Amino acid sequence: LFNYIRYEQQYDRNTPHASQIWRVFNKTMDGESVITQDANTHSAVGPVLKAEVPGVADYFRLYNGGSNETVVIAHNQPFDLERFFCTDPGFFRMIPQHALFGNLNTSLDAPYSAVLTEQTANKLFGAANAVGQTFRIPSGMCAGAYTVAAVVANPPQNSHLKFDLLTSYATRYAKGHEDNFDSYWDYSYFMMEPGSNMEGVRKKLASINEQFLKKDGIQLDIQPFTDIHLKSELTYEIESNGSARMVQFLGLIALFVLCIALINYLNLTTALAGERAKEIAIRKTIGAGRGNLIRQFFTESLLVCLISFLGAAFLTSQTLPWFGDLIGRPLAAPGAPFDWHFWQLGLAGALVVAFLAGIYPAFKLSGLKLSAAFAGAHGAGGAGLRKGLVVTQFMLSVGLIFGVIVVQSQLSFLKNHELGIQLDQMVSIKAAGFENDSLTRNKLNVFKDACSQLSGIGTLSASSIAPGLGINGISGSNRPLRWTQKPDYARITSYFVETDEQFFDLFGVKILAGTYRFSNDRVAQYSNVAINRAMLDALGFPNPEAAIGQTIGYENSENGAVSTITAVIDNFHIESLKTTPKPTLYYCFAPEQLKYLSFKVSPANLERTLNGLQQIWQKVYPEHPFRYWLLDEHFAQQYRSERQFSRVFGLFAVFSIVVSCLGLLGLTAYSMQRRRKEIGIRKVLGATTGNVAALLTNDFLRLVALAVICAAPFAYYAMNYWLENFAHRVSIQWWMFVLAGTMVVMIALATVLFQSLKAALTNPVECLKQE
């Protein structure tokens, strides 16, 4: 767990300039309230800050038109690349990379120049040194023929700026781009000179806000580069960020399990320390001073802890790759599973445990008077401390078990919650091109006709998005919007989705009112619009029927353009249930204009059906890779981190119970041993085995029951804090506490009862003959 926490906290710190780098982001405001926050911003931000603000040392932008993926043609073969950006030369100055071939100082200066990673170079050209090789991006905003100027080592995994291909931002200028404060699809980063004040940057951004962005209700703000992975919760992030809460929870789990183990050690040490009273007396009699005894006890404790630590380090090194797979992070570097931070913390922890475990015998017992020591007067010492520690460790165990129950309930809720859309047996394919021309249209018709001949293929539909692939491919607007009968514009962040006429029927999206129809008229495609319930509520319509036939328009729209609402649909989720459906406008387009093709497939012979689709695709679109998604599986991938968290939480909750019960077993065995005489006398006087077992079990069960009661408020607060991550979540119910408490009590009962029955069944003669 420490390795995982360390990995997360070191994210984006692999550049020496990490503490000096900042990212600019957009906020949409309604007065003083923040409506949305977007990670991308305007292309003019970086150049203006560098030119006009003292202390800004450098900048770079990342641009890919809203899609991290791209198709590359090399040697007439199509390849899929998952991480692609246009960027400025400042990227390599601010985020240094290890150059294998070429000169990074000039690699991004010229238009249509590119930098590949070693892995990408091998993939495209079969050799690491690909400098001078050419490839082509066939479509999209960055289409063109590129020359490889440099090859770099594969970027580290613990960075949100991972890439396969970088092309020069100068390419955008060559295509006619002009920096502006109008549209925003760029990610803007800048670096401050050491010791520079951020006040100048904030003043300049405030000036830009007032001069260019106030009319749209937008404000620019900044965030530290090192905060992005764990603390940023913006839309349009480059990659899914980590969770500071998850890191906090896993840190607490590690601390809990360590505390439970430490409590066991302290309990058994204090319990057994009294048995050494006569040993101490004899040592004192033959001349040992108190200092000698203190050193002896601490040395024993230290040796036990250091040997344990070395054993733990060996076990961890063997299991770290497996644990990394479980939690979805490459935690173990080949040949070097630990860095010096691990050894530093581990050794410090061993020393602390050794001190805590040795402090009672070292100072308490070394100070015993000889008469008391020979009499064994301290054989039962520390009973109150032991009871308190037992309550504490079972409080921690109950909290972890309760957490597992809540996490599993939330995952089950997410899995079974109504999405407003049918994703079962749905397949989406990334379209080869989305241009409304005769060639694209003809190829699409050929593909559709061929697909119709395959058994198990249903109706095909097209859309600008595939449900479950996230929001990054969806454009939006922060401009105020209103419907014609309203006097005031509403501050709404609205999103745009284009689909064909069959989309809602195919996916089972409910149309609440009106009809959704395609028009061949390019103007009509934008003058007629469908809205979802979230947009209906945001605009203030009383019901779906009231919206039909009304016109809506943006403030300061070109030529006063408006759209007529022809349909209202129910909300459906294209993102996970961590967020609520966003106010969205739906436009009906021709299939050849759209990015994704979707259809329902029969579950029978699914693999054969997909193979048939791939063969048809490769014949119709030889220059484009066949990419498909099973939408229900892909949608579920959005909860991958939660499932990983659940597995780790469950694993360590089991650890905590096992370790707690080991301690309870040891204390019970010790207690039974001390009460052998009492047990024998009670049986001679007529006590049954059940009477004796109940007597011996009662004390420990009361401690466990007290732990359950004390754990409840802390566990409730912690898990309620975790659930705040989700827009849709379960409510914490009383039965979750009862279940967690019952599980812990039953496990503790089984542990104690084992020793109690063993003691109760012992022949009383065996118990008494030694006295």
Image (cartoon, rainbow, N blue to C red):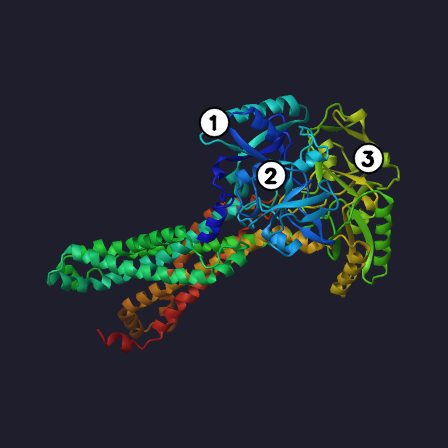
Residue type (three-letter) at the residue carrying disc 3: Tyr
| 669 versus 588 height, above or below | below
* Residue sitting at x 35%, y 56%: 263
Disc number for residue 234:
2
Q: Secondary structure at mark 1?
A: loop
Q: CA distance from mark 2 to mark 1?
A: 25 Å
Query: Looking at the picture, does residue 597 appear above or below residue 194?
Result: below
Query: Horizontal placement of 682 versus 76: left or right?
Result: left
Residue designated by label 3: 526
Q: Secondary structure at mark 3?
A: helix
Secondary element at image label 2: loop
Residue at the extreme front: 132
Q: Quadrant of the C terminus?
A: bottom left
Tell me which numbered mark, 2 or 1, is placed earlier along the sequence. Answer: 1
Residue 88, by quadrant, is top right
Q: Position of residue 134 (x, y in %)?
A: 69, 48
Counting residues from the start of the chain, the first of labels 3 and 1 encountered is: 1
Q: Which disc, if any, is residue 582?
A: none
Number of marks in picture: 3
